[in-house]
Amino acid sequence: MKPKIKIYKDLQELSAAAARLFIENATQAIATRGRFLTALSGGGTPKPLYELLAQAPYRSQIRWDKVHVFWGDERCVPKEDPGNNYFQARQALLDHVPLPAENIHPVASELEPESAARDYAQVLRDFSTPPLTFPRFDLVLLGMGDDGHTASLFPNSPVDESLPVISVTANYQDRPARRVSLTPLVFNAAKQVIFIAVGKSKAERLASILNGDYHPALLPAQRIRPDEGEVLWLVDEAAAEMITSS
Ligand code: 6PG
């Protein structure tokens, strides 16, 4: 299925739209399956979204006791490190909503990446939908780096797509290099994937991902093509500058 694209004036408008979509997905999943399984993204872009979900009018529109939160990727630093994706989500969202502690499923980021990946595969297995060995997420939130990476799937970095979780070492900006990432095996089983990307620095790669040829080794975000789910890109005008409508 072709990805859908929605363009917003700025990150503020985009985040409000993403908050509404988060609530819609949660409401529908809880009504039909009794729970909402979501995988969050790291990076700076989702922070305003997380903050909005923690505030009125959004916060009270979600049955938080039915929500289970996972991460699409994590940096292997202690859980109190500002570079930790779980820490960021706690500060912006999780500490401010009535989400039971047992519904929060962080990566054991204090471990070595290989051990943390193995451990997280077991965490996912506990929520698996047989015959899969991992959950079919209701909503996966993803970002995109200036180089086309998503989660911790980086250009020219091998991905064993037979595994649900891999360990990765990748230098990007000044962020921690040792990481754990879910793989396309898991992302492509999701019901809904929402990418959020803003800023001019992403414009060129975004156009290549959406309008260019399929080069997954160079543009890992292209690997995200759910079999039965939908991919939606929420982007701002600056990031969308080079996209063509065809
Ligand atoms: C991470 C991410 C990563 C992120 C992109 C975009 O933990 O680093 O999950 O894939 O989404 O690097 O980051 P920004 O939102 O900061 O541009």
Image: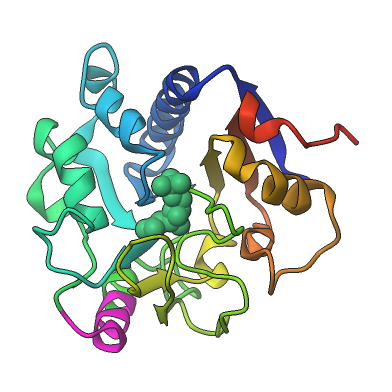
Corner quadrant of residue 178: bottom left
Note whether residue 138 is visible.
no
Magenta span includes 112: yes
12 left or right, relative to 153: left
Q: Where residue 163 sits in the image (x, y, percent)?
A: 49, 83
Q: Where residue 2 sits in the image (x, y, percent)?
A: 78, 45
Q: Where residue 120 sits in the image (x, y, percent)?
A: 29, 75
Q: Eyeballing the image, is 220 above or below 9?
A: below
104 left or right, relative to 22: left
* Residue 209 or residue 93, whichever sits in front: 209
Quadrant in which the C terminus is drawn: top right
Question: In the image, what residue occupies the spot 17% across and 53% down?
Answer: 82
Magenta span includes 97: no
140 left or right, relative to 70: right
Question: In the image, what residue occupies the spot 30% across and 68% down?
Answer: 176
The magenta segment:
111-121
